Amino acid sequence: MDISTAYKDNNYKIHVAENILKSQLSEYTAQYDNVYYLIDEHVYGIYKNSKLSFIEAPLVVTGGESFKYASPLMHTMEELLAFGIKRNDLIVVIGGGATGDAGGFIASTILRGVDYIHVPTTLLAHDSAIGGKTAINSKHGKNLIGAFYRPKAVIYDLDFLKSLPSSEVLSGFGEVFKHAMIHSPELTEDLFQATKETIDLKTLTPFIIKGIETKMTIVIEDEHEKGSRKFLNLGHTLAHAIEYKYKIPHGQAVMLGIIASLYISNQVYQLEIALDYYVDYMKHHGYPVGLITDMDVDEMLELIKKDKKNHKSDYISYVLFKDENTLTVTDIKVSDLKMMLTKLKERI
Amino acid sequence: MDISTAYKDNNYKIHVAENILKSQLSEYTAQYDNVYYLIDEHVYGIYKNSKLSFIEAPLVVTGGESFKYASPLMHTMEELLAFGIKRNDLIVVIGGGATGDAGGFIASTILRGVDYIHVPTTLLAHDSAIGGKTAINSKHGKNLIGAFYRPKAVIYDLDFLKSLPSSEVLSGFGEVFKHAMIHSPELTEDLFQATKETIDLKTLTPFIIKGIETKMTIVIEDEHEKGSRKFLNLGHTLAHAIEYKYKIPHGQAVMLGIIASLYISNQVYQLEIALDYYVDYMKHHGYPVGLITDMDVDEMLELIKKDKKNHKSDYISYVLFKDENTLTVTDIKVSDLKMMLTKLKERI
Ligand SMILES: NC(=O)c1ccc[n+]([C@@H]2O[C@H](COP(=O)([O-])OP(=O)(O)OC[C@H]3O[C@@H](n4cnc5c(N)ncnc54)[C@H](O)[C@@H]3O)[C@@H](O)[C@H]2O)c1
Ligand SMILES: NC(=O)c1ccc[n+]([C@@H]2O[C@H](COP(=O)([O-])OP(=O)(O)OC[C@H]3O[C@@H](n4cnc5c(N)ncnc54)[C@H](O)[C@@H]3O)[C@@H](O)[C@H]2O)c1
């Protein structure tokens, strides 16, 4: 399946299928003098004698989130420059969302921008590889330094997902679930049905594709996050605080955040979304829902306030449903939020 | 004098005049919740009790080129994040080309981009503040890491130039001279006449403005340096090597580079540009023309080869005149270049 972006210009393709890496990549690399491969060390460890054996002299980078800091980033930049990288060379970034974020940032700033292709290797990266956001972390928070920079292509070879540890599958699935919710109640219900018993990668492909399409529609509408792109933060307000405090994978925290968003939507817009239906489903699949009961609401609120990129004193912007089909961004008073989160704790 | 850019979108103004900083700036800062000032320490040292006394709590950054490295850059980024900078805040960068390059890069990457205004304080910065290139240096060369990122405005308060040391005036004047040459033989001749005896800042204003306009016309045509923007590199091929080897200010090296470009143009295109006219003028003003006689041609060629961002094995791209009015980019064989530079050494 090939999905094409629909920006005004500089469009690119997202190729999604099993076992496409080598053949698909060769169609692009042929156009460049030199190609540099940045590969997550865990991914390279698993695939160096199989799927990735065709790659000579890769730059193996520190695995996952640990790459998203200034010092490993600069180290890799200097390595690329030492090799004599030129403006018309290509960087291929192979790894999960973290490697993609930092690798994309490198591509955006080295020589003021060289072409790059992202090869996502996690389920979560069906999200992170779409939309052209790149970033690294600061001492003061995640993703605070970065650039908007589009790749030349995304090659999503689903074969990679087979080696994902189950906690990473749960994490990535959190974003698949979120995208279904943003898309429509119908798609959400289909996903519920398809994953009633187990989350099986084989049945997920159509939902991954829908997820990519949903995210793409939104980011094309609002590339630089001035309006509708905020809907993609469904569940993320509380999720970031939980993720920070309890060090659980991002997408798992998003699932817990979605519970909070649904609860708050019910309160603020007098809806009757069946919370238990969601909670039971998430518990069944092993999401750590109990952390909602454990959390210290004041501590969460402090983290939420610190996390905001756009400031408005005593209010928190929250992505909510205003009816079953419609998302909205609502400013909630911190004191009201405190009350609702406290009630949610008891309710779970 | 206000000059407006003419990009397709995101245009901004370049305000050029004496004593405009405070009043002009206030028209912009009023639109922002928070304004952060990054100021070159030398500039702040000179003006903190006068022109810059209205600024509370500036971030004083290490002076000149020493700021253009990853470590001071990251330090300042973390400081801004510690202050809680938000997407809708403004950064004002006050200093020469180096502070502008690194400050602009910070603005482009912090929170994936916040607005910034550049307040250039050197003569050379009439060049560097135009065109939206930002950058820092790598171990492997200057300006190898950066971004294309436009400011919201440039406020060029010519009052700052009064405190420039004469070697920096000579340096900045090198780029004024280059822009006149790129513009036309007529403007070049006018500039020769106006600066026959001394380079007096008071008489330079119209040439500074012409320089800004000349550069702007070219960078708007070719923002991302695929074609005509290369003409701005007139004199720069040899200049970068001389600058690196002899540690002289950039614009002074450009003047020496221009001599080489004229000599090579005469050879390659059988022109009769009066080289001595230029050489005598430059000597008169104190440019270190003797370095051309001193240089080791092989060493220069090695540095030139390393400097190239766009690769083509045994050739060097050189900006030349193909007639008195017309610039062109010509690939010169390294061996031919060696011969010509060797002859030039003897000729000076
Ligand atoms: N740019 C965006 O729009 C965007 C959106 C969402 C998330 N993100 C970012 O994405 C990151 C999270 O993504 P992620 O979950 O993919 O993280 P990740 O890249 O850290 O990968 C998670 C772990 O799985 C390992 N791994 C990767 N592929 C594997 C494979 N095929 N088999 C076995 N192990 C594998 C990694 O080494 C790592 O340890 C975060 O840094 C987040 O900020 C970015
Ligand atoms: N972005 C671009 O398109 C572009 C173009 C040309 C040059 N540049 C860059 O610009 C830099 C050179 O610019 P520059 O010559 O302005 O360098 P600079 O910023 O290093 O300033 C030169 C020196 O003058 C001092 N100074 C600055 N303003 C002063 C003032 N008003 N009075 C007294 N001293 C003052 C500085 O502290 C420094 O020591 C280089 O880093 C070069 O790479 C960028």
Image (cartoon, coloured by chain):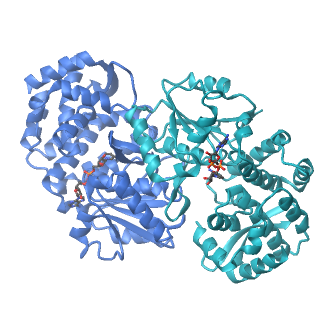
Chain colours: A cyan, B blue
Position of A50 compared to B221: left or right? right
Nearer to me, A276 or A115: A276
In the depicted structure, whether residue A149 falls above or below residue B86: above
Res. B269 in view = no
Residue drawn at 26 percent across, 60 percent down: B158
Residue B177 in percent (x, y) is at 22, 42
In the depicted structure, whether residue A196 falls above or below residue A54: below
Residue A55 in percent (x, y) is at 56, 26
Position of B146 compared to B244: left or right? right
Position of A302 compared to A179: left or right? left
Residue drawn at 70 percent across, 63 percent down: A236
Q: Quadrant of the C terminus of chain B?
A: top left
In the depicted structure, whether residue B301 falls above or below residue A339: above
Nearer to me, B299 or A51: A51
Residue B242 in percent (x, y) is at 19, 36
Q: Quadrant of the N terminus of chain B?
A: bottom left
Residue B42 in percent (x, y) is at 23, 63
Residue drawn at 65 percent across, 66 percent down: A246
Residue drawn at 75 percent across, 48 percent down: A166
